[in-house]
Amino acid sequence: MQIRSGIPSFRDDPRKYLFLILVLILLLLGGCQFLHLQNLSIPENPPVFKDDADRASLVQAVKRQLDYLQGLSPNARVLLDETPYTKRQLVESVKLFLDILNSNPSSKSLNRILHEKFTTYQAAGRENSAYGEMLFTGYYEPVYAGSLVKAPPFIYPLYARPRSLLIQNDLQSGKRIIGRRDTEGKFVPFWTRAQIENQHLLTGYELVYLQDPIDAFFLQIQGSGMIKLPDGKLRSIHFSASNGREYNSIGKLLVDEQKIPKENISMQAIKKYLDEHPSEIQPVLQYNNRFVFFQWGQGEPRGSIGEKLTPGRSIAIDPGTLPMGLVAYIQTRRPIIATSGEIIDWVPMQRFVVPQDTGSAIKGAGRVDLYWGNGPYAESAAGNMQEPGRLFFLVKKQQ
């Protein structure tokens, strides 16, 4: 099936007048259209639904997904491919999936039941790739030593959201715009990473101090983490806001400059390179204009939909191209980690997941970021995952 990138031309087919009217109605009702999906009612290569993780974590993740859906507006709508679904239908889909899990079917029975009861949609995948080919990456909750007081070696700050940061709605696009007021009162873009750091523009908003500027940078990329204070206490720190600037990948920069081979790029490889080339730390990190602000949190990290993330089950996607709030299924690979921390093999991974988060680097219908939780395995898996795979969404069949 051809991937649709916009509203159909009136000259293509008179029936598309009706389609256009339906799209407009859904948008007026607060709905979203997702045309980067293919209905697999008659699939050439249907997924075999198997799950390689524990069922308890899946039940937990699906319950949280249901909580999110039930909190949506009654007028919420989504358009998958060309089929509209109401909030009630989405809630029924997740409830049915949960009921099936609670009946404790065998793996073989689960696959059969899901194909009988659900319509499967496949994500379009990356541009210039075979249809359905996704890029899977990972993220995790790091733990860093930190101090509430600036004192060596704790001298690299993480900042709270400043009062000068403002958010407005663009009347033309309807999108949120992040900025600030200049000295003449004009709304302008917020400062870049380089401006913030080089000109010390956020003095007084320091939340906590870390020992390493690279750790502070990667914590901004992850969006949340744990801070271990000098007295041994752990405090959770979460994303609060960003400066609204474009995300520029320092990994891509180092590959493009031939400083790290593309096949070796990972969070660990980037950190190793910068540790070995300290004079390059500041220019490399400041290549990424995006800057993240934090707040102290409670308990487990939460995704952008407000629900707690479930390790190995929660994923981040681009909500502009793929739907949040459903049950999804992934097929990709995961690493096997030795006790030394080195990756010794990659094995198939296939499991049910729930889209509950977003990310500044997760754009388009071909990206999935899997949340791994915390600990050594999570750090290694998240830092090294750059795997191809497939992504599917399940919706209850309508009578």
Image (cartoon, rainbow, N blue to C red):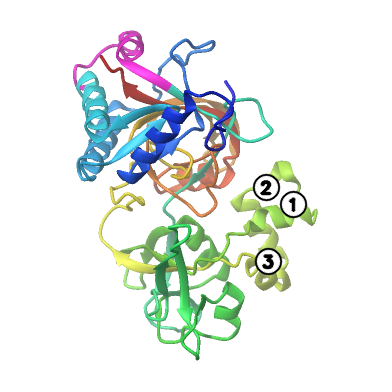
Q: Secondary structure at mark 1?
A: helix
Magenta segment includes 351: no
> Closer to the N terminus: mark 1 or mark 2?
1
Q: Quadrant of residue 236?
A: bottom left
Q: CA distance from mark 1 to mark 2?
A: 7 Å
Q: Image check: 160 left or right of 172?
A: left
Provide the residue designation for mark 1. Answer: 255
Front residue of 112/251: it is 112
Total number of numbered labels? 3
Front residue of 37/221: it is 37
The image shows residue 258, relative to residue 276, as above or below, that is above
Provide the residue designation for mark 2. Answer: 265
Residue 284 is tagged as: 3
Q: Position of residue 11 (x, y in %)?
A: 58, 29
**On-image quarter of the C terminus:** top left
* Three-letter residue code for mark 2: Ile
Q: Image check: 298 left or right of 50?
A: left
Q: Are marks 1 and 2 in contact (CB under 8 Å)?
A: yes
Q: Quadrant of residue 21?
A: top left
Q: Position of residue 234 (x, y in %)?
A: 31, 63
> Closer to the N terminus: mark 3 or mark 2?
2
Q: Position of residue 138 (x, y in %)?
A: 50, 43
Q: CA distance from mark 3 to mark 2?
A: 15 Å
Magenta span of residues: 102-120
Q: Secondary structure at mark 3?
A: helix
Q: Position of residue 27 (x, y in %)?
A: 37, 43
Front label number (1 vs 2): 1
> Closer to the N terminus: mark 1 or mark 3?
1
